[in-house]
Amino acid sequence: MTKAISELGEFWALASSVWEIGVFGRSIGELLIALAIFGAFYVLRGLFARYLLSILERWTSQTKNKIDDTLHGAVVDPLKFLFLILGVFFAVKYLAFSGTTELIAENINRSLIAVAIFWALRNAVEPIGDFFRGKNIMLTPEIVDWMITGARVGVIMIGVATVLQIWGIQVAPIIAGLGLFGVAVALGAQDLFKNLIGGISILVERRFGIGDWIKVDGVVEGTVEKIGFRSTLVRRFDKAPVFVPNQHLSDNAVTNFSAMTYRRISWSIGLEYRTTHDQLRIVRDEIEDYLTSSVDFVQPPAAALFVRVDSFNASSIDLMVYCFTYTTNWGDWLELKEKLAFRIKEVVESAGTGFAFPSQSVYVETVPPSPEEVEVRQDNAKALVAVRGVSGD
C-alpha cells in the first residue's frame, strides 16, 4: 500500500512537471489562459459584427450614393480580422516570450497587421473604380476594369513584399532575379505580349465594349462579354462561348453592329409584268407615303429613303425599297420589317396587281405529230408500197 502511494506521488510529480514545462517554456496553464484571451477577442469579433457593423450597414444603406456601401463592404472583413489580430497580440503579450521566440511572435503580429491593411486596400480598389465609372471621363468601363485588376495585383504584390521584408527577406534580389527570368520568359511568350498589346489597342481605340454585337470575318460573330488581358470572350448567338485572342481582334477588320446609328432595310419587290403604269405608280406612292408618315423610319436628310422602280428583271418589274429604322435592336427591327411587309402586300393587292415569281416561256417552232397522225402516215406509206408493187414500178 505504501509503495502504491509512493508511485502515485511520483506520477503526480511527473504530471506536474509536464504541466509546468508546457511549450516554449510556458506552462500549459499559461497557454490555456492565452487561448482564453484569444477566444474572448473572437467573441468580441462576433458581437462587433452583429451590432456595430450592422448599424453601420443600415446607415450606409440610407444614403443616396453607393460609394459608402461599397466602402463598407470593403472594410467589413478586415475589421473582423482585426479582432483576431488583437487576440493574438494580447495572448502573446501575456505569455511574455523572450529571445528568438519573442522575435518570431512579434513578426507574426506585424505580418497579420500588414495582411489586414493590404486586404482593406485591395477591397477598396473596387469602390474607387465605381467612382470613376460614374464620372463622365475619357476612361471607358473596360479600361477601368483593367485598371482595377492591375491595382489589385499591385496591392497584393506590395503586400507580399512587405511581409517578406518583415521576416528579413530582401525583396530587391528577388526582383532582380525575376527580371532575368522575365527576359527568358518573354522570348518564349511573344504571343502573350502581342495579345496584351492587342487588348490595350482595343480599349484605347474603343473598337467595341462589353455587350456589343461584333463580327470578324472568318473568326467570330456574337456579343462581347469580357475583354481580358490575353483574350476576349465573345458569346455566339447559339450561346456558345468563344475565347478570341486579342491579336485577332486588333489586326483584323471588326464590324461593330451595336455602333449603328440606324438600321437598314433594303428590299427588291418583284411585280408582275401585267402591272399597268397606273398600278405601278400607285404601289410606289403608297409605300413611300407609309414610310414617310411613320415615326419609326428615319427621314431624309438624316438617312436615305427610296421607293423607286429599279429594273425590268427577267420575270418581274423590280421595285426598290430602301430605308432605315431608328431602332437598332434586332427584335424591334424585325417587328418593323414585318409591319412593312404586311403594308406592302396590302398595297399590292389593293392596286389589283400581284407579286411575280420566277418563270420561263418555251417557244416551239414545230409541233410533233400526235400518235394517231403517226399511225395514219404509216398506213398510207404501206398502202403506197403495195400499189407500186402491183403496178410493177
Image (cartoon, rainbow, N blue to C red):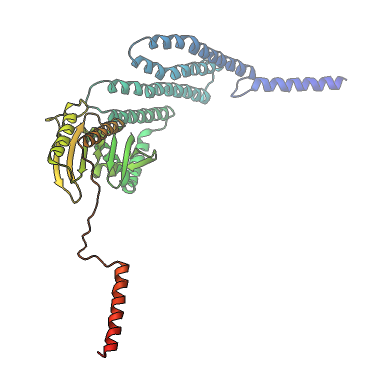
In percent of width and height, residue 226 lies at: 34, 34
Does any portion of residue 207 appear in the rendered image? no
Quadrant location of the C terminus in the rendered image: bottom left
In percent of width and height, residue 248 lies at: 28, 44
Task: Describe residue 100's horizontal placement relative to residue 326 as left or right.
Answer: right
Q: Residue at x 53, y 24 (%)?
A: 101
Quadrant location of the N terminus in the rendered image: top right
Q: Toward the viewer: 248 or 87?
A: 248
Quarter holding residue 300: top left
Q: Residue at x 26, y 89 (%)?
A: 391
Q: Toward the viewer: 377 or 256?
A: 377
**Extreme residue toward the bottom, this view:** 392
**Extreme residue toward the front, this view:** 391
Q: Residue at x 30, y 71 (%)?
A: 374
Quarter holding residue 135: top left
Q: Toward the viewer: 296 or 15?
A: 296
In percent of width and height, residue 132 lies at: 28, 22
In percent of width and height, residue 32 lies at: 62, 17
Does any portion of residue 361 appear in the rendered image? yes
- The count of marks equals 0
Residue 132 lies, with reference to residue 362, above or below; the image says: above
